[in-house]
Image: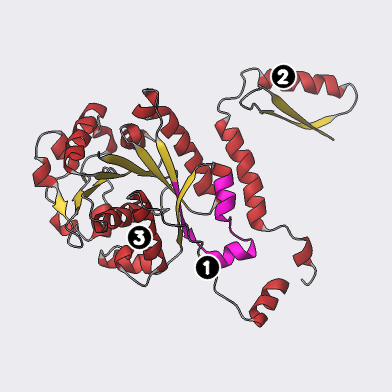
Amino acid sequence: MSKVIAVISGKGGVGKTTTTANVGLGIAMNMKQCVVVDFDIGQRNLDMILGLENRVVYDMVQVMDGEATLEQALIRSKANRNLFFLPASQTKDKSVLESAKIEELLKELRQKFEYVILDAPAGIESGFEHTIEFADSAIIVVNPEVSSIRDSDRAIGILDSKSKRVKDGGEVEKQLIINRIDPDMVEKGEMLSSEDILDILNIELLGLVPEDKGVIDASNQGQPIILNEKSEAGKAYKRISKRLCGQKVPIVQPKAKSKGIVGKLKGLFS
Amino acid sequence: MFFSWFKKKKSATIAKDRLKIAIMSDRGGADYPFMEDLKRDIIEVIKKYKSVSNIEIRKASSKDVDAISIEVELS
């Protein structure tokens, strides 16, 4: 049984593509055949994060239009042999997407892979709706910040009304990743805690990813952070990937830097 | 300030309160079509007793009941 997972958010810039790359690679590291598909037509980015931008020859729109075969367009990851990548078209725009063609493409991908992960475009327009239409489940990525949370609730609303599974009387599974948590700020009450966010959005938690400067360093090199054994964000993505592969892994709260007594007093009176 | 710490509401709490209201109203979808008319009528009635500076009417339906909340600010 294969599973199609759409990675979505309300607003852009919350780490959707980073999440797709790391979760895809993490699932592949768990010995599962996985493909990540860039659905952000016209704004291809997943190739850069995966370090595969120089290998792109054909894109998913060409596959859908029969100008290239799936085999020709799929790119195998250098980091893990179980991971494949299907790039977005850079020259066309989101209007080229058609439901019937997407359904056909996903059917073909389902036959080859256990996990099909779709990186949705930001926003809640047609490109977004096409990405979620045939998904079995969705990963919603938010930052602990008001605009991201509000927009994600709207994206969840569209997911609940436009997904084929829902229209057929079923349900689309939803799981939340809270990304870029600053535990020091949470401790000071200057950032929404994960409990607050779950209380507001009322969906299942998939994982908590702390803010990590290494993520930019990783994307500079096209080496997803999950490959960095020391990174806290990398470890968080490893746990998330295991959960997606059906393992029971406890949620780990990002830890605040422990302060000495002087620091604690300073915090109290600042 | 030394004592401001004790009084100041944490910004995360403010964010949570604001988000709950914003999301509730987002989820509520379209307002009832009669809201603008209702607003005008309420102003007319209250003006007999006291002048009104602002009226907020919100859809406040839950799963079981359809409801609206009306907040009248007097001037």
Q: Earlier in the sequence, mark 1 or mark 3?
A: 3
Neighbour class for label 1 at 10 Å: few (<14), some, many (≥20)? some
Q: Position of residue A89 (x, y in %)?
A: 21, 44
Which quadrant is home to the N terminus of chain A?
A: top left
Residue at the spot x=54%, y=65% of the render?
A: A183
Which callout, 3 or 2, points to the residue nearer the camera? Answer: 3
The label shown at residue B38 is: 2
Residue topped by disc 3? A238
Report the span colored magenta.
Answer: A176-199
Does the stretch in magenta take in A181?
yes
SS assignment at label 3: helix
Residue A174, placed above or below residue A45: above
On whether disc 2 and disc 1 are found on a single subunit, the reply is: no
SS assignment at label 2: helix
Q: Marks 1 and 3: CB-CB under 8 Å?
A: no
Q: Marks 2 and 1: CB-CB under 8 Å?
A: no
Residue at the spot x=16%, y=35% of the render?
A: A64
Residue topped by disc 1? A255
Tell me how far mark 1 sits from mark 3, CA to CA: 17 Å
Residue A213, placed above or below residue A54: below
Tell me how far mark 2 sits from mark 1, CA to CA: 52 Å
Q: Position of residue A109 (x, y in %)?
A: 19, 40
